[in-house]
Amino acid sequence: MTIASSATELRTTLQEQRETTGGPTTKRVFADFHIHTRFSRDSILTEEKFIECAVDRGLTHVAITNHNNVEGAVAVRDKVAEMGLTDRLTVILGEEVSTADGEVVGLFLTTTIPRGLSANETADEIHRQGGLVSIPHPFDPFRGSHIKEGPLRNLADTGKIDAIEIFNCRVTFQRHNLEAAEFAARYGIPGIAASDSHSSFEVAMAFNALAPFETAAELKALLPENDWHASRSSVFIHATTRWAVWKNLFDAWRGKRTATGPILGPQPPEDVRREPVKRPSPSELPSREPEAEEGRDA
């Protein structure tokens, strides 16, 4: 069963339960789907500090989406287990991928998706892993790494986007969040809010209130009824990422590793196209057979 069909079935079940009971059937969870830790080059947020902030501020579900690696999310998940907090904080393995067309976020991943694929190939690989495709800050002109309009429209036209950030706390001008909201509404794509946290100050500045979920299919079914809340970060918060970049470079120069995995940052599409990257072999990419494409509709 595909994510799309599972999500449709679950959405129908939830609707039937509402009609029977006259209201919501379950309690709410509070999720943020875009968070960076020290496995991103522009963050020095440790696993312990992040978990402490997330739990203290009421988050119950978090997607760790470091730049171009899923190892940072695994580190947070493992630390949550080590601290005995799995009943209070659910960690979704994610990645903010630098594609040849701009950044795309994958949620519910199993392995790192290499940077440098097209946005279309990246979306297919996310879905092949059973994950969801989310588009981060799509119209923020101050981030050269954001997805370009043509590839964005192509993903929307082909139904490959599961969520769009219609409120990103780090977007400098609110009109660019509104532009994202208008685009999502035009295509009927669910909108989410995201803190895009890179520091402890930003944790829980955005959250999405939803019925409890465990799987990608369950989340996909619930997203159309998402109730999000968020506030914009100060423009000066970007100074923290500049500081993190320089500190990580300095630590690397001293031979000090600040993470057990790769520390990678955002890359503009032009740089991704120029730099040779290790692409998956054809056998590792989603099948191009028509029946496989039809079965992977998500």
Image (cartoon, grey):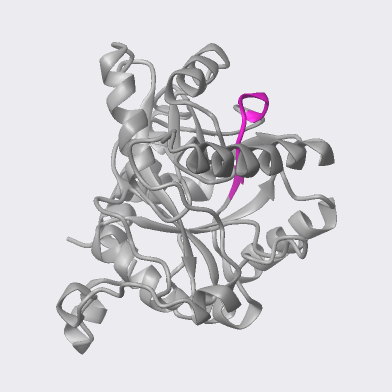
Can I make out residue 194 in this image? no
Q: Nearer the viewer, residue 239 or 62?
A: 239
Can I make out residue 245 in this image? yes
Reply above or below: 6 against 80.
Answer: below
Q: Position of residue 130 (x, y in %)?
A: 26, 57
Q: Quadrant of residue 8?
A: bottom left
Q: Is residue 157 left or right of residue 81?
A: right
Q: Position of residue 1 (x, y in %)?
A: 17, 60
Reply above or below: 34 against 76.
Answer: below
Q: Is residue 108 left or right of residue 103?
A: left
Q: Residue at horizontal 32%, vertical 12%?
A: 83
Q: Nearer the viewer, residue 238 or 255?
A: 255
Q: Is residue 151 left or right of residue 258?
A: right
Q: Position of residue 267 (x, y in %)?
A: 56, 64
Circle count: 0
Q: Residue at horizontal 62%, vertical 65%?
A: 145
**Where is the C terminus found, in terms of image quarters?**
bottom left
Q: Nearer the viewer, residue 214 or 100?
A: 100
Q: Which stretch did the figure color magenta?
A: 192-202
Residue 267 belongs to magenta span: no
Q: Residue at horizontal 46%, vertical 29%?
A: 24
Q: Is residue 181 left or right of residue 176?
A: left
Q: Position of residue 105 (x, y in %)?
A: 47, 56
Q: Residue furthest front?
A: 254
Reply above or below: 122 against 238.
Answer: below
